[in-house]
Image: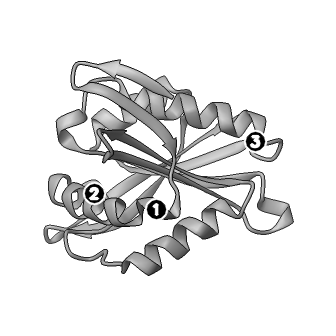
Amino acid sequence: MEFNSKKGTIVIREATKKDAKELIKYIHTVSKETEFLLFSDGEFNPTIEEEQNFLESIIQRENQIFLIATIDNKVIAAFDYQGGTRKKIEHTGALGISILKEYWGIGLGTKLFEVFFDWAKSNNITTKVDLSVMTHNKRAIQLYKKMGFEIEGTIKNAVFMNDQYYDYYAMGICF
């Protein structure tokens, strides 16, 4: 999918093993820009081969997808969904999304969800999607609610950073 934004033409597509190096660069950049990821700057250091293997493992499963958004082949956003690996839970899974700060507020999160929902509704497996979000991440919560997610519970003291504990919401949507 391509769409024009005030930042340029954005391409949303499934990641391939060839994207491993750019994805690693992306992760190093985005991890410095926000406290809302579940890892800190410098904690996520896969080799190119490890990232390629990770991407290949997602490509191999019908109920998993890794989307990226690019401008001029530079990764500016990542969206991954990993469905259950056992028969009883293959219909459900968890997602993660991140966007470089420079591209916040231009509708990119909405577009990523639209592409994902099209994929999820057509794969004949996915019927429930979960995510976790820190309770003070108001911008993300607003997006998730707009996309139809509901708060299903609060996980107390889920994250420890800056010498204090933070809660997160468990959110979900059913198709």
Spatial CA span between label 2 and label 3: 30 Å
Measured along the vertical axis of the image, is residue 51 above or below residue 31?
Answer: below
- Which residue corresponds to the image point at 22% horizontal and 64% vertical from the top-left? 28
Give percent across and percent down for residue 30. Answer: 23, 55
User: Residue 64: horizontal and vertical position, in percent?
Assistant: 65, 55
**Label 2 sits on residue:** 26
Q: Which residue is nearer to you in this view: 36 or 47? A: 47
Q: Is residue 117 left or right of residue 126?
A: left
Q: Nearer the viewer, mark 2 or mark 3?
A: 2
Of the residues under marks 3 and 1, which one precedes in the sequence? 1
Q: Residues within 10 Å of mark 2 (few under 14, many from 20)?
A: some
Residue 23 appears in the picture as rendered: yes
Q: Report the amino acid beneath label 3.
A: Thr
Q: Quadrant of residue 107?
A: top left
Res 127 label: 3
Label 1 near label 3: C-beta < 8 Å? no
User: In terms of image quadrants, where is residue 149?
Assistant: top right
Residue 170 in the figure: left or right of residue 41: right
Describe the element under mark 1 as helix, strand or loop.
Answer: helix
At mark 2, the secondary structure is helix
